[in-house]
Amino acid sequence: MPGSLRTPTTRRDSRRHFCWTRRPGCGPWRRCLRCGTRGRPSSTTPEFAAAGKAGTTVADLLAHRAGLPAYTDDPAGLPQALLLDPAARVRALAAMSPVWDPGKAFLYHALTYGDLVGEVVRRVSGESVGRFFAREVAGPLGLDLWIGLPEREEHRFVPQRAVRPDPTPGQVAQAVERAGLAPGDRIATSLRASSAELGRATASFGTRRGRAAEFPAAGGIGDARSLARLYAALVGPVDGVRLLSAATVDRARTPCTDHLPQPGVLHRLDGPDRSRFGLGFELPRPGAPLLGEGSFGHAGAGGRLGMAHPESGLAVGYVCTAMAWEPSAGPDPRWMPWTEAVRKAAGLGG
């Protein structure tokens, strides 16, 4: 999430924080399942079949296996004007050819994930992800959580702040080269483009236009209470509302990438702390232990965190204003004391 909302100490908070949308879209997730995880996005979006994507499955989209980590092969990334246009983002992805054979490798799709999954939701439901989420999930659960912040809520918004400067395009290019990728390699250009696009999207969240825009993978705005309530409704009823069945939760937390390498030479960087994905959610790893074995959730930019443990019924949401977490350095130090205490209190170990 790009920021948060103020939350009063009374029953409802008056301000909201970004949580970066990682991944509150359980309603959209259900819509994707209507196509079947073995189904193909091209069944709802025929133009997506272009450029070698006809065999891509819904599961590939949900598990970051689609081979589309950026919107363009231009290392400079998609320009700002197009990045703020949902239709332009979808058109760009439809025209792209996969950087690797879908389903054969995986790599985090930081921004494109939201539009890849979101377009399936839009075609099936007839609504944008933000509107669908508001009607099917946030409304029934009484959440102060939006994908596209309404103007009436602007006064409650609490901006984020960076604790270190973003890497420059030159620094990203050097890091990509140090990873063993030639400058013209498509994986290299995709990494550079993704970094540039994420930087532009993040900067846009400092504006009303950016906060109003629907970035399904990165633009969620809400408070920790709502994030926790959302995850609680994934694993059990909350005021009579349950979003996913137990069987669907088990499908969502089944590892979908543990057996796959990262694409190209990036597999050389694989280690014990590499990312792990189920269908739409992160799974525990040393750098993001969540609530331990059996839990699922997602860490967000800067250190936001949402997670649930089905067997215990525990769900947690955490938001922050300081963009302090550096994923390559391991778990966010801010997480460690309270997550350990929560796990012990729930009988989940230290």
Image: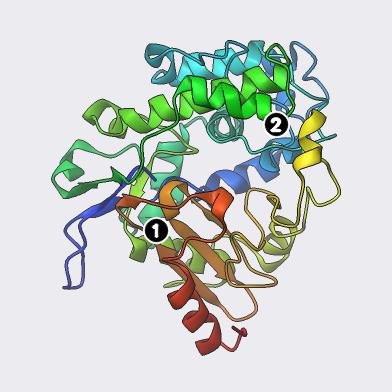
Up the image or down, 40 lies above or below 274; here it is above
Q: Position of residue 302 (x, y in %)?
A: 42, 49
Per the image, label 2 sits on a secondary structure element best described as loop
Whole-number angstrom distance, CA of label 2 to CA of label 1: 46 Å
Depth check: give the residue in front, 92 or 276. Answer: 276
Up the image or down, 233 lies above or below 127; here it is below
Label 1 crowding class (10 Å Cα cut-off): few <14, some 14-19, many 20+? some
Depth check: give the residue in front, 241 or 78. Answer: 78
**Label 1, on which residue?**
140
Q: Position of residue 8 (x, y in %)?
A: 17, 66
Depth check: give the residue in front, 293 or 303. Answer: 303
Q: Nearer the viewer, mark 2 or mark 1?
A: 2
The label shown at residue 179 is: 2
From the viewer's perspective, tell me whether residue 83 is left or right of residue 283: left
Determine if residue 36 is in view: no
The amino acid marked with disc number 1 is Pro
Q: Position of residue 299 (x, y in %)?
A: 52, 54
Label 2 crowding class (10 Å Cα cut-off): few <14, some 14-19, many 20+? some
The label shown at residue 7 is: none
- Tell which circle, 2 or 1, labels the residue nearer the N-terminal end: 1
